Amino acid sequence: MESQAIVIASVGALGVGAQWIAWRTGWPAIVLMLAAGFIAGPVTGFIDPKSAFGEMLDPMISVGVALILFEGGLSLDLRELRHSGGAVWRLATIGVLVGWALGALAGFYIAGLVWPVAILFGGILIVTGPTVVIPLLRQSNIQTRPNSILKWEGIVNDPTGALCAVIAYEYFYRLNENPGATVFDVVPPLILAAIIAGLVGYAAARVIVYLFPRGAIPEFLKVPVLVTAVIAVFVGTNQIEHEAGLVAVTVMGITLANRDVSSMRSIHPFKENIAVLLVSGIFILLASSLKWEDLGYLTTSLRPLLFLLALLFLVRPITVLVSLLGTSVPWNERLFIAWIAPRGIVLVAICGLFALRLEDLGIVGGQLLIGLSFAVVVATVIAHGFTIGIVAKLLGVKGTSRPGLLIVGSTPWTIALAKEMQALKTPVMIVDQSWQRLSAARREGLPFYHGEILNEATEHNLDLAPFQVLVAATDNEAYNALVCNEFAHEIGRDSVYQLGENVLEDNRHALPEGIRGRALFEAGYGVSDVNDKQKQGWVFKKTKLSDEFDYEDARERLPDSATMLLLVRHDGTLRFFTHAARPEPRAGDIIITFAPPQVRAAEEKAPDRAPKPQAG
């Protein structure tokens, strides 16, 4: 028991630690997790999951994979398919068949696997790892359509790949029992089982949609009930057919994501956190379970290397290009999608599971799947993870590279701020539900969105990906706090700002700090303060710092009443001055200041002892 506790603690520390290093360095997390698990397992022998957990290891991993797929399904909104539905459908049908056939041929003729193993492995290879694809897409800022296609393909094809492996396994299992069995004896029952499993997942989701809004489940039990329901659906449908539970939980997640259930918003942070923990834990466990003999095949022959090259440069590109023939997807996006196909947790987990089952059937070469699956993961993650940004840029599918500013509320002050930021080539968008208030933004030629920012439809009509900072500056400070609280999870608590210091005259907080954004300006100006100053003629101005002209020099040039709002780094990163924190100015930064109108006259009379700041 004590050794199991040590393994659990070590797996958690290694997994989360690898994720943290990936965040700090920008390296693919799965590569670091693989390295950590490999060092902890076969290299040092510190962790031996099979010895610690015994027969419980496979069920633990299976349930973890089910929860990961359910979480992935929760991120899929069917409205996204209005731009990419045809491409996703083709990749999930034509792409599956073509990819399976090509993968099996490559496995037999290049990797040297026997036909049963090659066919089963070819089916598993159609998965494209949502736990790897989605973070890569988020990190690389890819345009909406290729982003959506790759995300949907990753989620949909994970259970499909598992089902293909089940079909192959069941065929060879029944062939072993009855040499006269045909494909038609195996495939129809399995497809029927998958359909039944999908219907069970759909029904379970509809029950939750019915119960949650009606108060049948108390708030504190909603997450436990949901997780328990997912596990129960997975285990129950697996009794119908092996791995049919993966289909059920994916359908369950997609159904919940596309139903209007207000409770799901509060569940999202938990499900994302548990997904990170599960991905970290499962991959560390699988990597540390490797044995040196599993890797012998990879080091004693050129076949695995040639197989990986064929997978990267032949199997995937041909699969995608054949699948997308005749679609409206532009060729540059097709080529990008054809290159990006990193594999992850599900591939390794399913290969580990079926390698043992193939051995039980007496099929030679089943054990090769373990080492080969890890090789595929490492090769694809490194190849695609480290080149996705370069390839996206070359093919013209990369979104804007500079961090954008989303401004909620169209007022004279926000329009002036938006013009200043647009002049610095910072992507900016003004959002307001009043067409009349947006008229000034339209006259100035500023990007705008007419609608309620808190409306769920806005998430699908407005691409929020380019915007890493939000400023809520409507006339209602409580509404500003609500907007900041709503977007804090998506954008980051440290990147949502609003006007107002949140302190009443008796030093009490007007609103709890946890539900509002950071207060703009060191002076904590409120909405009425900036509006009044705007009417008095206050303006925004730019000051560029250098080694010869630093922050103190800039401060001296400004009148005492002027206040600094933010600085813009050379890469476009925005750092705001707030009542609680001041960013550290550096040479090359541009400081945006809100100052009275006489500052321009003062600048004209300033001595020439230092380079003149740029005036805005």
Image: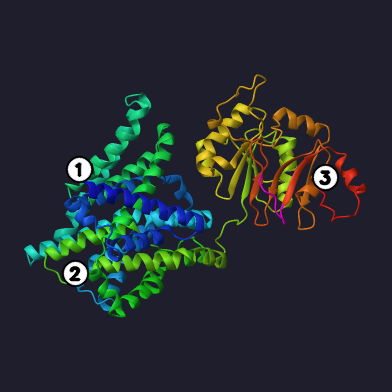
Q: Is residue 269 left or right of residue 332?
A: left
Q: Which residue is at 91% across, 51% downward?
A: 607
Q: Amino acid at mark 3?
A: Glu
Residue topped by disc 1:
236
Q: CA distance from mark 3 to mark 1?
A: 72 Å
Position of 407 compared to 489: left or right?
Answer: right
Q: Tell me whether the residue at label 3 lies in contact with that at label 1, contact meaning CB atoms closer than 8 angstroms.
A: no
Q: Residue at x 17, y 52 (%)?
A: 55
Image height check: is 164 above or below 107? above
Main secondary structure type of the part rendered in magenta: loop
**Is 584 within the magenta?**
yes
Q: Is residue 195 magenta?
A: no
Across and down, in percent, residue 531 comes to 75, 31
State the residue position of label 3. 556
Q: Which residue is mark 2?
A: 116
Which element carries disc 3, helix, strand or loop? helix
